[in-house]
Image: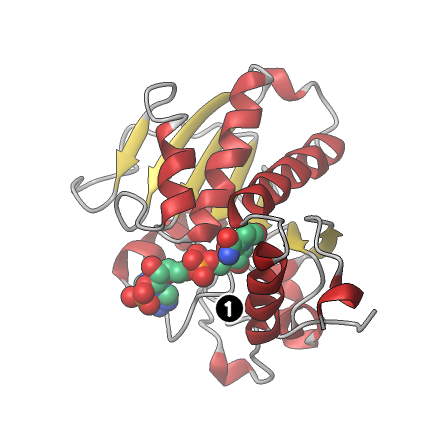
Amino acid sequence: MMKFVTCGQMKILEKRADASGLSYYQMMENAGTSAFEIICSKYESSIGDTKVLLFCGKGNNGGDGFVVARKLLEAGSDVSLVLVDGKPASKDAITNFQLIEDKLPIIDMTVTESPFMDIPGRQDILIDAIYGTGFHGKLRPNALKAAAFINQFKKKSLICSLDIPSGLSGDATNFSQIDANAVEADITITFHNKKPIHLQPFARPYCGETAIVDIGIDEESLW
Ligand SMILES: NC(=O)C1=CN([C@@H]2O[C@H](COP(=O)(O)OP(=O)(O)OC[C@H]3O[C@@H](n4cnc5c(N)ncnc54)[C@H](OP(=O)(O)O)[C@@H]3O)[C@@H](O)[C@H]2O)[C@H](O)CC1
Ligand SMILES: [K+]
């Protein structure tokens, strides 16, 4: 297997996997389930006793986050959800949001003026599911606020990014192509294979440790 796949190659692989019978929905389920398992293995105490703050965007990275939230809720964790760009917009993310929306407190940054005012200062785990391979450009005001809020917990809580720390472009090869205010994760859980950004020394303070999880794609049979 190659050392990485670009974001464009990843989209092709997902499309071919879907066409050969592994649905986008199943890939999201696999991504979220494996991310949940990694988070459990990283967190030393019982996952059921943890307080978790999850930040989701409106694309499929957010969808992965909703799957993680469902797994955490099933395990007994106290999970709160922040919708950074409002309600989800992609089909599978909407389905996964509907499975949890009445089961946890939700703060929608597009309608709340001071979104973090009532959030307790003690959080055990913060999960960044704002943007993944679909990110482009720089962070806009809501996501900037969310990233700054998450980064305040650095060294106090476990910060996990799903696929790519939000604010980094997956294919960036140069510091000028990323947002310097991106999420600074302790661990980045990436899907199927690393993306170019995970191999860049300048991105290391944002990615932290990178863990790769299998989402069921058999790459060799798809190229
Ligand atoms: N394909 C699948 O089913 C699977 C995907 N996985 C996960 O999904 C992401 C990729 O998902 P995608 O929806 O393509 O992209 P993102 O969720 O990363 O982001 C798209 C949304 O973000 C908006 N966006 C992008 N840049 C910015 C920015 N600078 N400021 C604000 N908003 C931004 C974008 O809006 P547009 O206006 O550009 O359309 C989208 O709304 C991948 O990383 C995986 O985590 C699963 O793992 C497997 C199945
Ligand atoms: K992310």
Q: Amino acid at mark 1?
A: Leu
Q: Nearer the viewer, residue 31 or 113?
A: 31
- Residue at 28% x, 34% y is 107
Name which quarter of the figure residue 8 lies in.
bottom right
- Asked whether, in this view, residue 37 is left or right of residue 105, the answer is right
x, y (%) of residue 110? 20, 47
Q: Position of residue 129 (x, y in %)?
A: 48, 48
Numbered label tally: 1
Q: Nearer the viewer, residue 4 or 104?
A: 4
Query: Where residue 80 sits: x, y (%)?
Result: 40, 28
Where is residue 220? Give x, y as percent: 79, 67
Quadrant location of the C terminus in the rendered image: bottom right
Res. 166 in view: no
> Which quadrant contains ligand 1?
bottom left
Query: Which of the 4 image quadrants contains residue 141?
Result: bottom left
**Disc 1 packing (10 Å; few <14; some 14–19; many ≥20):** many
Q: Is residue 1 left or right of residue 71?
A: right
In this rendered view, identify the residue nearer to me: 149 or 43: 43
Residue located 61% across and 16% down the image: 48
Relative horizontal placement of residue 211, taking residue 121 as reference (left or right): right
* Above-or-below relation of 95 to 195: above
Q: Quadrant of the N terminus?
A: bottom right
For this view, does 151 lie left or right of residue 26?
left
Mark 1 sits near ligand 2, with its Cβ under 8 Å away:
no
Q: Which residue is denoted by mark 1 in the rendering?
A: 168
Which quadrant of the view contains residue 156? top right
Taking the spot 62% from the left edge, 75% from the top edge, the residue there is 6
Residue drawn where x is 62% and y is 50% of the image:
21
Given residues 96 and 140, the one toward you in this image is 96
User: Compared with residue 73, is residue 16 higher up or lower down, i.e. above or below?
Assistant: below
